[in-house]
Image (tube, rainbow, N blue to C red):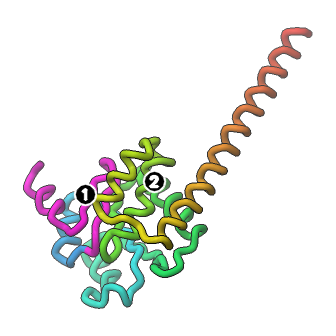
């Protein structure tokens, strides 16, 4: 681990997800500068502005240092499943060609989503994903319910994709047989 990686790992509740994706609690302005220097080009803040009053103008600061800043606030008390699914898909899209850092106040919102990301987007087993989640926190009833609800949506999506692939393969085989019979 080089010096900047050592510094970044000191951000509260830091987690390395994969080479294109990192998470943590709320970084300070100095830490955002280090994040940029490390090669991250996009940060995604899932906290509500009022939850981090100590750093009011994060968007302006990120603009000044050349860091793409997105904020998609997730309500702590009633996180909407559709919005969480949107965030997961957005992250999956961004990490294809960007290095992304996702954060919130204490990395609780983010780590809950990363639990799902690890399983459904990275193919990591449930036990390992759960161990990583529990390094940050053990979700309360609200967030456990959200995790289960979004997990069901992701399972349904996966099943639909598998069914569509099977149907397409079957149609392709039928066409091949029709052509062979001619």
Q: Which residues are magenta?
A: 1-26
At 73% from the left and 27% from the top, the residue drawn is 169
Q: Secondary structure at mark 1?
A: loop
For the residue labelled by badge 2, is the local secondary structure a helix, a strand or a loop?
A: helix
Q: Earlier in the sequence, mark 1 or mark 2?
A: 1
Q: Residue furthest left?
A: 3
Residue drawn at (61%, 49%) of the image: 155
> Which numbered tag is attached to residue 71?
none
State the image quarter where residue 39 is shown: bottom left
Q: Give how far apart the Cα atoms at labels 1 and 2 are.
A: 22 Å
The answer to the question of whether label 1 and label 2 lie on touching residues, with beta carbons closer than 8 A, is no
Judge whether 160 appears above or below 141 on screen: above
Residue bearing mark 1: 39
Q: Which residue is mark 2?
A: 117
Position of residue 108 relative to residue 119, above or below, is below
Residue 134: quarter of image: bottom left
Q: Image check: 181 left or right of 150?
A: right
Disc 2: CA contacts within 10 A as few (<14), some (14-19) or many (>=20): many
The C terminus is located in which quarter? top right
At which x and y percent is residue 88?
A: 50, 60
């Amino acid at each position: 681990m080089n010096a900047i990686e050592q510094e970044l790992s000191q951000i509260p509740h830091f987690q390395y997800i994969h080479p294109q994706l990192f998470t943590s609690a709320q970084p300070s302005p100095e830490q955002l500068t280090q994040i940029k220097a490390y090669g991250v080009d996009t940060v995604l803040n899932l906290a509500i502005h009022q939850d981090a009053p100590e750093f009011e103008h994060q968007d302006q600061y990120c603009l000044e240092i050349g860091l793409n800043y997105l904020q998609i606030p997730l309500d702590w008390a009633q996180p909407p499943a559709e919005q969480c699914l949107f965030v997961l898909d957005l992250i999956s899209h961004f990490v294809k060609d960007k290095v992304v850092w996702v954060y919130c106040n204490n990395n609780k919102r983010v780590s809950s989503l990363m639990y799902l990301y690890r399983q459904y987007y990275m193919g990591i087993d449930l036990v390992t994903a759960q161990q990583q989640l529990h390094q940050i926190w053990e979700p309360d009833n609200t967030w456990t319910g959200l995790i289960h609800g979004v997990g069901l949506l992701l399972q349904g999506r996966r099943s639909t994709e598998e069914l569509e692939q099977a149907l397409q393969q079957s149609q392709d085989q039928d066409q091949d047989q029709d052509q062979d019979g001619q």
